[in-house]
Image (cartoon, rainbow, N blue to C red):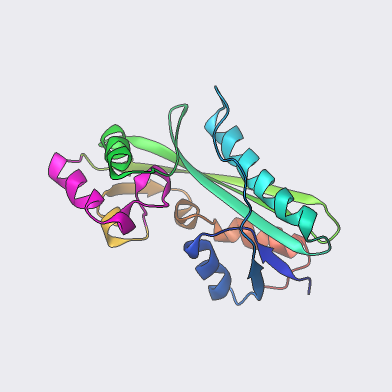
Amino acid sequence: MPQIILASSSPRRQAYFKDMGLSFEVVVPDIDEAPYKGEKPADYVKRIALQKALKVANAHSGKVVVAADTTVALGRRILGKPDTATQAADMLRLMSGRRQRVLTAVCVVDASGSIHEIMTSTVVKIKPLSQRDIEWHISTADNWQGKAGGYGIQTTAGGLLVKSVLGSHTGVVGLPLVETCNLLRRCGVAL
């Protein structure tokens, strides 16, 4: 079986790989994740996943490299990871009572250098949020730091914000498992 590198610092993606029984190494790519002016959310998330995968694959030829990126799209607006509690609160206000798409792109560069990509789009509806709901959510950094849109659906705090999910729950968490497993199998990884 080919050696696998997960090009991600995400503890959630690492936990999924461990749960799948994969033996893997973590290499965190250093890339600029700023969206281009006017870039559409789907184009953005696919570009970032591809850049992460290629950055690591170029330094580790002959290995299977897996990278992913997740963003929240409110219309054409990209809601990435907030840097501050104020930014997280602003994002939650924007999403309050509304549907948004959570886009996760996965890019796998196989041992021969071929590129395999998928993207999932999941519709998440956030319940109407009061100021108190928002303040409670942002009061603990773990609730919003490092999470696209300022919430993590897999946490109790994030789950309490979500009214409904239509699509890949694991994609919202950061790695659509069914689709990722299919890509890995195509690259010779036994699952």
Residue at image position (70%, 62%) is 184
Is residue 178 positioned above or below 82 on the image? below
In the picture, measured across the screen, residue 97 lies left or right of residue 168, that is left
- Compare residues 87 and 169 and report the one nearer the observer: 87
In the picture, measured across the screen, residue 185 lies left or right of residue 22, that is right
The quadrant of the picture occupied by the N terminus is bottom right
- Compare residues 134 and 129 and report the one nearer the observer: 134
**Could you tell me residue 155's position as x and y percent?**
33, 61
Residue stretch rendered in magenta on the structure = 129-153
In the picture, measured across the screen, residue 77 lies left or right of residue 8, that is left
Q: Is residue 147 magenta?
A: yes
Is residue 22 positioned above or below 44 on the image? below
**Could you tell me residue 100's position as x and y percent?**
39, 37
Residue at image position (82%, 52%) is 114
Residue at image position (34%, 50%) is 151
Q: Quadrant of residue 177?
A: bottom right
**Could you tell me residue 130's position as x and y percent?**
15, 40
Q: Residue furthest right?
A: 112
- Compare residues 142 and 3 and report the one nearer the observer: 142
The quadrant of the picture occupied by the C terminus is bottom right
Total numbered badges shown on the rendered structure = 0
Q: Residue furthest top?
A: 38
Residue at image position (56%, 40%) is 33
Q: Quadrant of residue 173?
A: bottom left
In the picture, measured across the screen, residue 115 lies left or right of residue 18, that is right
